[in-house]
Structure formats: C-alpha cells, structure tokens
Image (cartoon, grey):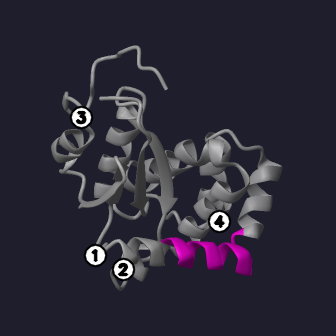
C-alpha cells in the first residue's frame, strides 16, 4: 500500500482479555503494516456497566499523558497481572509494581498514581471513553481505522483479517514472522 497516512486508534481496557488479544496483535503489526497505532485507554464501564478497572485505567491515562512511551509496556504488565497472575489491578501496590516492571522509577510510578486521582486525568479518561462511544463502540476492544480519508470502526479482537483488508495489507496470523518494516 502507498505512503498515505494510516492511523489506528485502539480503545481498550485492561479488564478485557479480548482487548489484550487485539492489543498484542496490533503492537506486533504496527511496523509491518507501517501504521500509526494510537493506544487509547478507555473505561469499559463507561460503555458496559459493572466493570471494575477504574483506578487502573485512570493510571494508564496518567501514563499516557506524562510518559506515553511507556504506555504499551504498562498496559501489557497490568494485563499480565490480572489475567496471568490473578492479581487485583485496582490495588495501588499492584499498579505500582506493574509501572516499575514497565520501566518507570518508583518515584515516577507514585507520582502517576497520585496524578491518576486528579480532575485532569478523570476528565481525559471520560473524554476518551466518550470518543469511543461517538465512534459507535459497544464494547472493547474497539479499533478505529483512519485510512485514505475514511474512518472505519471494528469491534473485537477477531477482526484482524478485516483490518488487514482495510489497510490493503496481508494478514499473517496473530504472530507474524519478523520483517524489516519501514515506519
């Protein structure tokens, strides 16, 4: 496909294992498909009621605001804790441990945990969640594809083949072979 601007917005919540699947696949393909992947931490209860990840998603929103280069690793670490280790990701000590494992210093992690309770972070998470709803999200993960001046909304982690088609790219399964992609 040509060099046109291609952006994917991934709206996700670490409470959703399906968000995790979509997250990992898109992280693997971002360089192969030469796309700009925008990670958008979203509060699933703003879309679906009775979710319990608010403090974790506020923390990831604060990470995105202050240290976006660590967002991918911090998100992955929270998923590992809840879905692989059965840890409660709303407990401050688990959030802090995930942040440090992702590469933040203990001081940075504590500052972000403190920031996560501010009105600025709360407002940003609410705005991101409302943006997902405006695109038509009814669950997570929701991926919004911006390509060739058009916008497409896809729900679920099982739409990667359709996503590849929209991008004019080849789908090589959830773990693509290593390739030298240009970005």
Q: Nearer the viewer, mark 4 or mark 1?
A: 1
Contact? badges 2 and 1 (CB < 8 Å): yes
Query: Which residue corresponds to mark 3?
Result: 174
The first of marks 3 and 4 along the sequence is 4
> How crowded is the residue under tag 2: few (<14 C-alpha within 10 Å), some, or many (20+)?
some
Is 123 displayed left or right of 38 in the figure? right
Nearest to the observer: residue 84 or residue 160: 160
Nearest to the observer: residue 80 or residue 174: 174
Q: Secondary structure at mark 4?
A: helix
The first of marks 3 and 2 along the sequence is 2
Camera sees residue 117: no
Q: Which mark is residue 92?
A: 4
Task: Choose top left, top right, bottom left or bottom right for residue 86.
Answer: bottom left
Q: What residue sits 32% from the left and 65% below the top?
A: 140
Camera sees residue 38: yes
Inter-mark Cα distance, 2 to 1: 6 Å
Query: Which residue corresponds to mark 2?
Result: 47
The first of marks 4 and 2 along the sequence is 2
Contact? badges 4 and 2 (CB < 8 Å): no
> How crowded is the residue under tag 4: few (<14 C-alpha within 10 Å), some, or many (20+)?
some
Q: Secondary structure at mark 1?
A: loop
Q: Is 122 one of the magenta-colored residues?
A: yes
Of all residues shown, which one is farthest toward the right? 107
- Give the residues in magenta: 116-128
Q: What residue sits 30% from the left and 74% below the top?
A: 136
Query: Which residue corresponds to mark 1?
Result: 138
Inter-mark Cα distance, 3 to 1: 24 Å
**Residue 118: image x %, image y %?**
74, 77
């Amino acid at each position: 496909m040509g060099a046109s601007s291609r952006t994917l917005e991934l709206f996700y919540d670490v409470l959703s294992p399906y968000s995790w699947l979509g997250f990992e696949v898109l992280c693997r393909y971002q360089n192969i498909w030469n796309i700009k992947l925008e990670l958008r931490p979203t509060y699933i209860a703003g879309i679906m009621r009775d979710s319990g990840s608010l403090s974790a998603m506020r923390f990831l929103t604060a990470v995105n605001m202050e240290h976006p280069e660590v967002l991918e690793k911090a998100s992955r670490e929270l998923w590992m804790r809840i879905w692989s280790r059965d840890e409660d990701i709303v407990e401050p000590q688990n959030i802090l441990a995930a942040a440090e494992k992702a590469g933040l210093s203990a001081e940075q992690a504590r500052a972000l945990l403190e920031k996560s309770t501010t009105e600025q972070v709360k407002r940003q998470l609410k705005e991101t969640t409302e943006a997902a709803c405006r695109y038509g999200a009814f669950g997570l993960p929701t991926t919004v594809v911006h390509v060739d001046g058009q916008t497409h909304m896809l729900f679920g982690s099982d739409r990667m083949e359709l996503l590849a088609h929209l991008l004019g790219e080849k789908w090589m399964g959830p773990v693509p072979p290593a390739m030298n992609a240009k970005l």
